[in-house]
Image: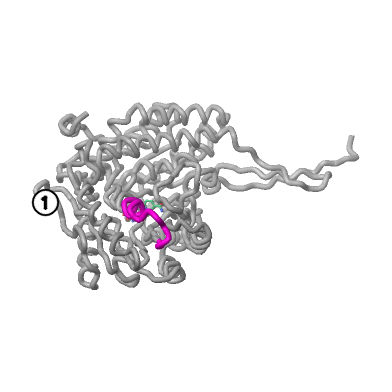
Amino acid sequence: MGAADWAARAAAIAVDGRAVIDGQRVEARDGQRFDKHSPIDGRLLGSVVRGQAADIDAAVRSARSAFADGRWAGKAPAVRKKILQRFAEKILSARDELALLETLDMGKPIQYALGVDVPSTARTIAWYAEAVDKIYDEIAPTASNSLAMITREPMGVIGVIVPWNYPMIMAAWKLGPALAAGNSVVLKPSEKSPLTALRLAELAVEAGLPPGVFNVVPGYGHEAGEALALHMDVDAIGFTGSTRTGRRMLEYAGRSNLKRVYNELGGKSAFLVFPDFGDVERAAKTVAGSMFFNQGESCNAPSRVLVHASIADRFVEIVAGEVPQYAPADPLDPATVMGALVDATQMKTVLGFIAAGRDEGARLVAGGHQARTETGGCYVEPTVFDGVLNGMTIAREEIFGPVLSIIRFETEAEAVALANASAYGLQASVWSDNVNRAHRVARALKAGTVHVNQYDEDDITVPFGGFKQSGNGRDKSLHAFDKYTELKTTWLRIDADKP
Ligand code: NAD
């Protein structure tokens, strides 16, 4: 399909903004809604339920009943597997619709919504479905007069709160393990991107997931989000979002029922290029591709590049030469690689960081301006600063937009110290052909994932999460089951003398 076909589909789209509670589409208890505009061109997409505490409470009650009567947790693992597999198939069948909703809602290019977000969401659900009947519990090596069983049990009701940058994928990283383990879920999507989550809940019901097991209540963070995180009958919160809000999640848990809180938060990932790496061009092109993907709105964007001074001029020149191909364009055109930022607020924030970079003395080598103003949408040019110092605002704070900072270093020790001098510790990357250095530096970096001589490798099979203020939990892989299950030990006495 070409741009015109997608535009025609977009013009005809009808948005259903009602919540999904107990398997039904419902209005807010008090009837409130909010308008949802597209960052592509400001068009009104429709209105969406503005959930409040009463709506969250209804969803949590529904989730609790579903859990308590065993309609999901009590099903045989093979049955849960089959239903989740059908859910994944339904997601793939709805590929065009979901991709279009995602693009219109948060501005990403349609080619990535189609080629990355939808298939990755389906694969995540399918992967956890497949795991359901392959995980065994343990028996401890105790004395012969007893048997100690170590089992994992679903927790009950999981509250899931997600951001807007990969709305479906972030939700799936929580839904997959939480549902596969037998829990019920109440999902609060971002108010900036609620549309696909609502469709996912409908597709899950169509796939056979019993009503009440997966509920979605859209709304604002300080209303629906806070109510969910404070709810006394929610057993755990799977949160992805900013470090600022992650802090609040911990407070909410402290103020309510000490629910488990798993935070997946922000990042300021360092990308270290040493002079002994032979292919500077590949390193420079990789950083541009990873940084500008998803408009720079990726938690793991390699936004702090540390380059050895001896190769820095060449590196900067190559990165700057890459910038034009990432120029923002119409997200509904399948050829577009950079779309719109999520909304005007985010665009203003990003432009504010660019101004801070200039004011604090960094050298702007590419971009730096708003783009496509004639469209009424929210676009910013891919932007590169050279001569950045690690203490500058643009090197310290997560910008969450297409802004790359290049910092020069002289020694390996300095590079490692600079990389670790950050409140965050989500990801990092080391570029060196010296295997000793690559290992040494990878070990020294305080980050949840370290890449060596590449950046984009990623798979559902490996954990994703951060050190320090980038969070505490790990999404993806079998480790994610730890977040949504309780570990129980059951001791049985075995009496050898009794007949
Ligand atoms: P955000 O913290 O503003 O919002 C995230 C979610 O929390 C939204 O659903 C929002 O409505 C809700 N929320 C906001 N305030 C709340 C409150 N007071 N109480 C309860 N809920 C509240 O973050 P964002 O701007 O939507 O997302 C961007 C952030 O997400 C970035 O920091 C990014 O790094 C992070 N992120 C992290 C990962 C990861 O895996 N570590 C992945 C993607 C995004």
Residue 210 within the segment the image draws in magenta = no
The percent position of residue 487, horizontal first and vertical second, equals: 62, 48
- Nearest the eye: 92 or 454: 454
The quarter of the image that holds ligand 1 is: bottom left
Q: Give the answer, above or below, for where 337 lies relative to 312.
A: above
Residue 249 visible: no
Residue 207 visible: yes
For the N terminus, the quadrant is: top left
Q: Residue at x 43, y 62 (%)?
A: 469
The percent position of residue 468, horizontal first and vertical second, equals: 46, 63
Amino acid at circle 1: Thr
Q: Residue at x 23, y 48 (%)?
A: 326
Q: Is mark 1 within 8 Å of ligand 1?
A: no
The residue carrying mark 1 is 373
Mark 1 burial class by Cα count in 10 Å: few <14, some 14-19, many 20+: few
User: Among all residues in the image, which is located at the extreme left?
Assistant: 374
Q: Give the answer, above or below, for where 153 lies relative to 210.
A: below
For the C terminus, the quadrant is: top right
- Nearest the eye: 60 or 345: 345
In the image, which residues are magenta? Answer: 274-287
Q: Residue at x 18, y 44 (%)?
A: 329
The percent position of residue 173, horizontal first and vertical second, equals: 44, 43
Image color mode: one colour
Residue 284 within the segment the image draws in magenta = yes
Q: Is residue 301 left or right of residue 494?
A: left
The percent position of residue 219, horizontal first and vertical second, equals: 30, 47
Picture quarter containing residue 125? Answer: top left
Element marked by disc 1 = helix
